[in-house]
């Protein structure tokens, strides 16, 4: 078993990811009204935690690397810190490059999803921080296995997948997204090559969404002209 995974993202009308690149809100529409919708809806899902990729987690965690002298040899087994009833802040970090400096991100318990090739020093650092970690295979790309561990070890039933685009694309490729919750800003990016909210990096011609279809379940216009869409993902029978 694995958690139910909702990909919750905000985008411009051309599907781009970074709000700093979006055109400004129209006259009379406060930008903070538009921004507030994302967190309000996020909180309304009452999920057990949220998942982001390494780059985004580095921006949020803001820790610095520490040198651990003579770290112990540690087994490549999941380690649970003291969650203390908190939601989970899950970072997909195959190479062990995210430094938390504490046991939480924004008050939610930090969990690193690693590859087994990470150093003992990094594992010792995570333990000192009070963070949890688990392994997604040798290279950190066994996302189905990682999601199953989050269910069995932490009791996670629903998780929000919140980017970046590369991680969202990898989850789509593995058939791990059950719903899309998409907030469309009344804005445009417009530059070719800008990262999109689902940005799969794989072989040319590979289609990460093959065998999957989307069914619209909700469409709502929010204050300021933002549109909220929800789609369930339907998969072709094996």
Image: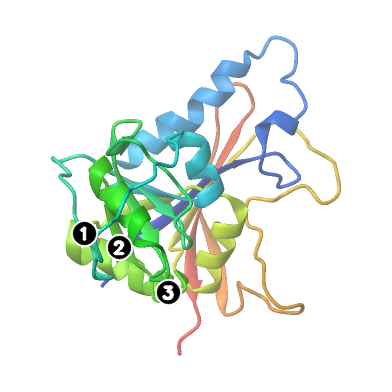
Disc 3/disc 1 C-alpha distance (Å): 17 Å
Quarter of the image holding residue 157? bottom left
Q: Earlier in the sequence, mark 3 or mark 1?
A: 1
The colour scheme applied to this rendered structure is rainbow
Disc 2 versus disc 3: nearer the observer: 2
The x and y percentages for residue 155 are 18, 58
Asked whether, in this view, residue 149 is left or right of residue 21, the answer is: left
Say whether residue 155 is visible.
no
Asked whether, in this view, residue 72 is left or right of residue 222, the answer is: left
Q: State the quadrant of the C terminus.
A: bottom left
Q: Is residue 193 above or below residue 173?
A: above
The x and y percentages for residue 166 are 61, 58
Q: Are marks 3 and 1 in contact (CB under 8 Å)?
A: no
The residue beneath circle 2 is: 134
The residue beneath circle 1 is: 79
Mark 2 surroundings: few (<14), some (14-19) or many (≥20) residues within 10 A: many
């Amino acid at each position: 078993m694995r958690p139910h995974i909702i990909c919750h993202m905000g985008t411009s009308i051309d599907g781009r990811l970074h709000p700093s690149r979006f055109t400004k809100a129209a006259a009379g529409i406060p930008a903070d009204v538009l921004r507030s919708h994302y967190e309000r809806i996020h909180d309304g899902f009452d999920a057990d935690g949220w998942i982001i990729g390494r780059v985004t987690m580095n921006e949020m965690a803001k820790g610095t690397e520490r040198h651990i002298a003579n770290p112990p040899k540690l087994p490549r087994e999941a380690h649970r810190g003291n969650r203390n009833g908190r939601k989970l802040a899950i970072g997909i970090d195959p190479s062990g490059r995210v430094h938390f400096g504490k046991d939480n991100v924004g008050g939610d318990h930090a969990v690193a999803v690693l590859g087994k090739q990470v150093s003992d020093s990094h594992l010792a650092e995570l333990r000192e921080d009070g963070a949890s970690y688990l392994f997604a295979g040798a290279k950190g790309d066994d996302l189905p296995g990682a999601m199953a561990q989050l269910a069995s070890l932490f009791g996670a039933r629903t998780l929000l997948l919140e980017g970046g685009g590369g991680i969202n694309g990898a989850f789509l490729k593995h058939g791990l997204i059950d719903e899309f919750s998409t907030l469309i800003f009344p804005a445009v990016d417009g530059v070719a090559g800008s990262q999109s909210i689902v940005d799969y990096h794989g072989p040319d011609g590979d289609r990460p969404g093959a065998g999957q279809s989307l069914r619209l379940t909700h469409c709502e216009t929010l204050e300021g002209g933002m549109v909220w869409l929800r789609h369930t993902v339907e998969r072709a029978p094996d």
